[in-house]
Image: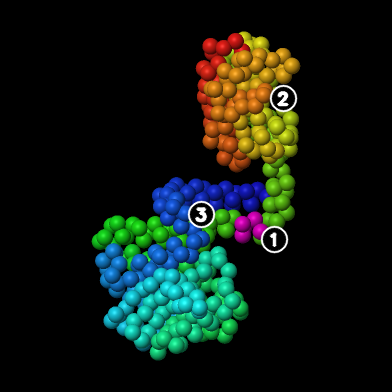
Amino acid sequence: MLQLLDKIKILNKYQKKISDLSSEERFNMFKICGVNHYEVTHSSILTELLSNNSSHNFGNKFFIAFLKTLKKENLLSEDYQFSLEDIKVIPEFSIGELGRIDILIKNSYQCIIIENKIYAKDRLEQLKRYETYAKNKFTDYKLFYLTLYGDEASEDSAQDSNYSTISYSYTIINWLERCVEISAKSPVIRETLIQYINHLKFLTNNTSLSKMNNEIIELLSQNDNIEATFTIGERLNDVKNHLINKVFLPQLNDLCEELNLINDSDEYDRVNTSWAGFRIINPNWNFFKIALEFEARGLRNSIIGVTYINPDNRKDEILEILKGRFKDKNKNWVWNDFPKYNSWNKDAMIAIQNGEMKNIFKTEIENILSKTKDLEM
């Protein structure tokens, strides 16, 4: 087990470095704007890049790079030529009763049809209908089925049609990386392409962090490690309780002593207890106490505020004033969301170990004392 922990520790160090390096990748305007599973949005982006009269001002260079990418993947023959004369790239092209093509690239006698599927289901005879249209209108056609990972179309959709699969995870990303090289001297276009590539890597679980997580999963799943993995998993709640009872409660005692308060919190199984939390008594208060509680079992949804010491010994006129000074309230409580660590998971346990949690508690308690200093509590 010690060898396993040592290996995971090494991987976690690399994961932290990768996480720090990829912070810019995590800021992504495509992700922020919700460009995730909407095929229409992705089709519009791809159409704009493939079009020769697009605002990117690179003419047919991106489209030619797309054809070269398909040739590299043996999806087009090396001698395949697509005439650039009168070329048009059209998203959501209606073909009447036969449906609507996601991306149609055409000239006077050739066409390339791209059916773009991310999470939507295939429709009955969809690819077959598109092939029928292409055969009737063009002397030369290519039909591509684009998914995140290059999946095959369903039998209901394909119906023996002649199509090839392409993927965002490989085909599109490889093509876009070539487009980045082409646009190297145009920073706005180049950086936009890089952001879109990073977004596609996020969608296809192809980031450096995802690969590192997969390495950890592979390590934990090895025959020699399975027993140790489950033993550790079964003890995680015990570890959390130990850190709270043996590390954090002494810190809370020190903090309360520093602030002339009393820590009224005992050791117990907080992880598996509903409405678990911590209680702090102010010797100068007769009706209220400071409390942190977890609204959900498992140390989830933490809130911090003021509640009655004894609900039968009330001071409702003071409670009414307090309701205007805190975010939420009920007949016995006023509270705010606990900052940063809403649920006490791994990061919260690390914060207990390094003393950060104690500092957060100090700030929150001092804020509560400041909000209530003019009241007879």
Left or right for 322, reference 23: right
Amino acid on which disc 2 is placed = Asp
Q: Which mark is residue 209?
A: 3
- Picture disc at residue 252: none
Residue 300 in which image quadrant: top right
Residue 363 in view = yes
Residue located at (60% from left, 41% from top): 346
- Per the image, the residue denoted by label 2 is 266
Which residue type does callout 1 highlight?
A: Asn
Instruction: Say which of marks 2 and 1 sits in front.
Output: 2
Q: Are the residues flagged by discs 3 and 1 in contact, CB closer than 8 Å?
A: no
Q: What element does badge 2 sit on? A: loop
Sequence order check, earlier mark of 3 and 1 = 3
Residue 219 counted in the magenta span: yes
- Label 1: element kind: loop
Instruction: Point out the tag, 3 or 2, that comes first from the N-terminus.
Output: 3
Q: Badge 1: how crowded within 10 Å, few (<14), some, or many (20+)?
A: few
Residue 205 vs 342, above or below: the answer is below
Quadrant assignment, res 297: top right
Could you say which is closer to the camera, residue 237 or residue 198? 198
- The magenta segment is 217-221
Q: Is residue 62 left or right of residue 141?
A: left
Q: Which residue is mark 1?
A: 223
Question: Magenta span: helix, strand or loop, mainly?
Answer: helix
Tag 2–tag 1 contact (CB < 8 Å): no
* Residue in the image at 51% along x and 61% along y: 37
Give the residue drawn at x 65%, y 16%.
316
In what element is the residue under mark 3? helix
